[in-house]
Image (cartoon, rainbow, N blue to C red):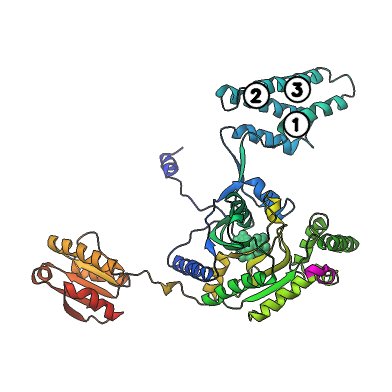
Amino acid sequence: MSEGAAKKEEKPRRFQAIRGTRDLLPPETALWNRVEQTAHKVFSTFGFGEIRLPIFEQTELFARSIGLETDVVSKEMYTFTDGPLKRLEDIAGYIRSMVEYQSFLFVAQLFDFYVREFKLGVSRGDLPEEHRSTLLEMHNILEAVQNLDARRHEGDLSTEKERVLARIKLYVSVPRFADVLALRPEATASVCRAYIENNMQQLPQPVKLYTIGPMFRRERPQKGRYRHFYQIDAEVLGGTDAPAIDAEVIEMVMTFFERLGLEGVQLHINSIGDKNCRPKYVELLRAELSKVKDKLGPDSQRRIETNPLRVLDSKLKEEQAIIENLPRIGDHLCQDCATHYAAVKHELGLRGVKYHENWRLVRGLDYYMRTTFEITAKGLGSQNAVCGGGRYDGLMELLGGPPTKGIGFAIGEDRLILSLLETGHSPLATPHSPLLYIAWMGEKAYTTAIRAAKNLRNAGFRVELPPVEQKFSKALGQADKLGARFALILGDNEVASGEWTLKTLADGKQEKLRESDLVEHLKKQL
Ligand code: ATP
Ligand code: MG
């Protein structure tokens, strides 16, 4: 290797943000803050309190609530194992995922690793003493494997192998010795977990909560779709399922969007039935879809089995005509669901909320029932949904809580901000350029400058105090570059006379002021 090449290699590596994540920078972050402040204000007028939740939870919480067949759980979650026995659990996870289709010997070898790791755990004291007997039992299995291997020429041993595999499966069947965790892909499951864990059913019902924060889904990144994105999420838990609650939740999010000046806002609503009527409709849909299976794309074909409702969501051009002819859920709602849906529409009318009914609107997560809605906005291309929500009365029970009514929504904050920017909402509404730049020279002037900066900042002005001395001409140039409106000139003369010079940068006008008058004078200028 030449010397030059060696030098080049020494250059420290530069890092980049992970694919699908991004930095939010000023001045755009000022707009993020404005959006969040508006959410705090509007939501509190509707009686919502803020809840702050952990960013990781047990994977099982999401698997059970969102549903195993959904894209979010089946392929988009960031999961990891945690704890001193993490390696043991990782090997168990491999065995679980391979046991059905890998060779007997391969699985047996992995199990050998598992047993070694287990033994380490016992000797380190990470596994309690009583597991010594488990270790003995597992050694017996390994002996059986060796025995079968020695007899491999004896003809058909498949029944015996099956028996050994069944014993192996028993030991690795569930994650037992480490936590299997996931970065949260959404907030509703966590809010419900928190409701149960903190006994919120003892509070006056319903409990109205909202939360703002990052979510994680391993999707293909594109405009308006990221792997680390933000949601503003609100939930109403407990009490009744009165249609007025559905309508008020929707009214709240529409009010929030209106307050922000979001453009092209359209509300789409639907009812997807409940556990009485939906299963029958899903079966009907499945039967009808099976008849036209050959004309559908691979995704929809798969969904006929796993999640037929999701076929209605398809954006594929070739499938549109077929979908239009499918049976519609609105014609198959039970009496209670139909009455509830009609009442929700009436309540929206009372509140002056305009909506479009869309029979094809289903949500990607399993737990929704009855009222579902989605809100779209301008300037977002195909990722135009800024909010999705709905009712989920059965969810709390699924998570081991008492029967509890629930409805909520999640706003995609990234998309909301994108739409605001695309329609000309300047992030500069809260400017971060300084109002006043202090040009100081000399040691005495510096002490005065520090005092002046402190007083002005306490009064709420944005002040830039240069950290090193510089000539006045240079300081004024710098003030200009930063976009300051005023420069406060502090030299030995000013300090000695107590008369300070305030320069308006746009027109070069200079005024003499006393220190005590400065704050009042600036306030008048704003
Ligand atoms: P989509 O159909 O666009 O994938 P979704 O049905 O998966 O949305 P929800 O789980 O209902 O979305 O989440 C609510 C909102 O969160 C969406 O309407 C969207 O604005 C936002 N959102 C969802 N996934 C992402 C993502 N990967 N990046 C940015 N925003 C997202
Ligand atoms: Mg999605």
Q: Quadrant of ligand 1?
A: bottom right
Q: Is residue 491 above or below residue 100?
A: below
Residue tagged by mark 2?
Answer: 131
**Which mark is nearer the camera, 2 or 3?**
2
* Circle on res. 141: 3
Name the residue nearer the viewer: 254 or 392.
392
Residue 495 lies in the magenta-colored region: no
Circle 1 residue: 170
Q: Going 66% across and 52% down the picture, which residue do you hit?
A: 76
Q: Tell me whether circle 1 and circle 3 mark residues in contact (CB < 8 Å).
A: no
Vertical side of 139 occupied by 282: above or below: below
Q: Position of residue 383 (x, y in %)?
A: 64, 67
Q: Secondary structure at mark 2?
A: helix
Label located before the other in sequence (2 or 1): 2
- Element on which disc 3 rests: helix
Q: Quadrant of residue 329?
A: bottom right
The amino acid on which the numbered mark 3 sits, given as a three-letter code, is Ile
Q: In the image, is residue 184 above or below residue 255?
A: above
Range of magenta residues: 328-337
